[in-house]
Image (tube, grey):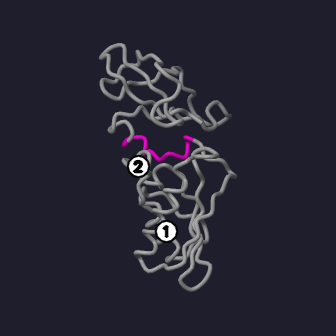
């Protein structure tokens, strides 16, 4: 896998390699992240000679980037000798910002986008400490003194915020 995550159980070596290739495709809206780092790759299955099915979950139902993701995956796998690629949209389980890898979160911050706060099972028994602060950290100076400017930014999955300390605006990847 591109990010070091384990391949889904039962994958053959060929499927693992094809999953790595498909997962290395950059996200069309956030090209700093790969589809694997974004957490939208659900797996690859060889369905016959020269035929594969790729399972992909959009960040939200109706995401306009899913078509570009599918086309890019098809192109990459075609270039690696797989002539028949089918990309299937999988809506369940739904994608969550918890699916973004640690490397993906690091890259978002480095790119100037505040990564989403972990949601998951925070507060569930045995889940570890519950975050005390709900503050959004500025990716430029690190201050938690930020304000919401707009609930929507360049894409529906991001909000526009401004840091009160350094006055710089920045995108925040909203938690889902």
Q: Is residue 99 magenta?
A: yes
In the rendered view of the protein, which quadrant contains the N terminus?
bottom left
Magenta range:
97-107
Mark 2 residue element: loop
State which quadrant residue 2 falls in.
Answer: bottom left
Q: Which residue is mark 2?
A: 33
Pick the residue in front: 40 or 89. Answer: 89
Q: Is residue 102 magenta?
A: yes
In the rendered view of the protein, which quadrant contains the C terminus?
top right
Q: Which residue is mark 1?
A: 74
For the residue carrying disc 2, how many other residues have a C-alpha within 10 Å: few (<14), some (14-19), or many (20+)? many
Q: Position of residue 106 (x, y in %)?
A: 38, 41
At x 48%, y 34%, the residue is 173
Vertical arrangement, residue 69 with respect to residue 139, above or below: below
At x 54%, y 73%, the residue is 85
Q: Position of residue 71 (x, y in %)?
A: 49, 63
At x 53%, y 20%, the residue is 132
Q: Main secondary structure of the magenta part?
A: helix
Vertical arrangement, residue 27 with respect to residue 156, above or below: below
Tell me whether the residue at label 2 lies in contact with that at label 1, contact meaning CB atoms closer than 8 angstroms.
no
């Amino acid at each position: 896998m591109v990010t070091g995550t384990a391949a889904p159980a039962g994958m053959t070596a060929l499927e693992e390699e094809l999953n790595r290739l498909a997962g290395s495709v950059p996200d069309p809206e956030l090209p700093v992240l790969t589809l694997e780092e974004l957490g939208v790759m659900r797996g690859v299955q060889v369905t016959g000679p020269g035929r594969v099915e790729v399972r992909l979950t959009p960040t939200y139902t109706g995401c306009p980037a899913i078509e570009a993701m599918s086309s890019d995956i098809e192109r990459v796998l075609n270039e690696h000798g797989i002539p028949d690629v089918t990309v299937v949209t999988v809506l369940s389980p739904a994608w969550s910002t918890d699916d973004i890898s640690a490397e993906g979160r690091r890259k978002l911050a480095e790119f100037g986008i505040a990564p989403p706060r972990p949601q998951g099972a925070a507060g569930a028994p045995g889940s570890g400490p519950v975050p005390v602060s709900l503050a959004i950290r500025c990716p430029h100076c690190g201050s938690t003194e930020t304000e919401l400017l707009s609930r929507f930014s360049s894409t529906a999955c991001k909000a526009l915020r401004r840091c009160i300390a350094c006055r710089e605006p920045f995108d925040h990847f909203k938690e889902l």
